[in-house]
Image: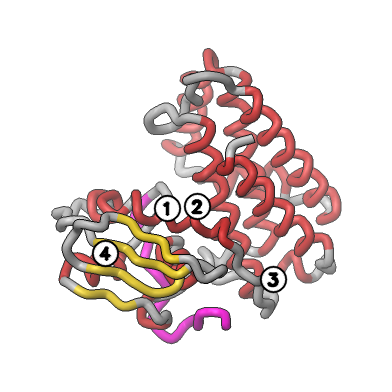
Amino acid sequence: MSQAIEWLREECEELEQLLGGLSDADWNLVTDYKDWTIADQVMHLHQVDMWGARAVTDPAGWDDFVKSVRTYQASGKSHYDVARETWNALPRADLLALWNKGWRELIGKLEQVVGDDKLPWFGPPMRPDSFAGARQMETWAHSQRIWDVLGKTRTPTDRIKGVCELGVRTQGWSFANRKLERPPVARVELTSPAGEQWLWNPDAEGLVSGSALDFALVVVQSRNVADTGLKCEGDNAKAWMAIAQAFAGVPADPPKPGTLKVPK
């Protein structure tokens, strides 16, 4: 099994354990992300997992599926609306069981992709490892919103490197998505939860340095950079960290300074 797929599995298992201890009332707690409840977060994760499973099993029908998505988007309906219409009436124990089954199904299908085969997607086709990395990042990000609203602190592990890697790779995207001129990429130096040093773009000018946890929280927009211990040197690094966005979709803004502090 690839490391990316294993990290995705571990991410899902950790969230599964957390969700398994929730009361029915907990599922209705409103997180800081788009006013989504915990249930909304899980429905969205399941929704995209099922898209991924479809991409693996029915690549020939993918274009028709995308057309159906564009059709409901054109009518003003969002993915979020569709997810709620489909699953919000489920008892929360059933929703949890559905998501648990779905992510395992997705991982099983990703493990069956061989050679240089790629998954069709809404953008360019993706290799299974790249897709698993994106799913890990999104699962980690939505999990953080759930940990936050529950007032709990999770212990980071070095699989957070997958989130950081995607955060670094989307440096240019963060500007292009806002139709801004892309400055030169910045060097990134992070300390992992285990104390290792991780380095990206070693010859670049400008620097973002600090803990991997702080960096991951900023690039998934769970924290404002001002509320972290990250150091940003150079105009390019400062501009990037102000708008960093590791996930696809329309431009989104980080929380306002002082909204949420980094877990200690």
Q: Which mark is residue 162?
A: 2
Taking the spot 26% from the left edge, 64% from the top edge, the residue there is 240
Tag 4 or tag 1, which sits nearer the N-term? Answer: 1
Compute the Cα span from label 4 to label 3.
32 Å
The answer to whether residue 74 is left or right of residue 142 is left
**Residue 22's image quarter?**
bottom right
Return the residue at label 1: 165
Q: Which residues are magenta?
A: 250-264
Tag 2 or tag 4, which sits nearer the N-term? Answer: 2
Magenta residues, dominant SS class: loop
Q: Amino acid at mark 3?
A: Leu
Q: Are marks 4 and 2 in contact (CB under 8 Å)?
A: no
Q: Which mark is residue 213?
A: none
Which quarter of the figure is the N terminus placed in? top right
**Circle 2 Cα neighbour tier, 10 Å, few/some/many (<14 / 14–19 / ≥20):** many
Query: Could you say where residue 256 lies in the image, as x and y percent from the top left?
Result: 39, 79
Return the residue at label 4: 240
Q: Amino acid at mark 4?
A: Trp
**Circle 3 Cα neighbour tier, 10 Å, few/some/many (<14 / 14–19 / ≥20):** some
Magenta run includes residue 255 = yes
| Residue 69 sits above or below residue 63 on the image | below
| Residue 72 sits above or below residue 65 on the image | below
The answer to whether residue 198 is left or right of residue 87 is left
Compute the Cα span from label 4 to label 2.
19 Å
Q: Secondary structure at mark 3?
A: loop
Return the residue at label 3: 29
Which color scheme did the rendering employ for the protein? secondary structure
Q: Amino acid at mark 1?
A: Glu
Q: Secondary structure at mark 2?
A: helix
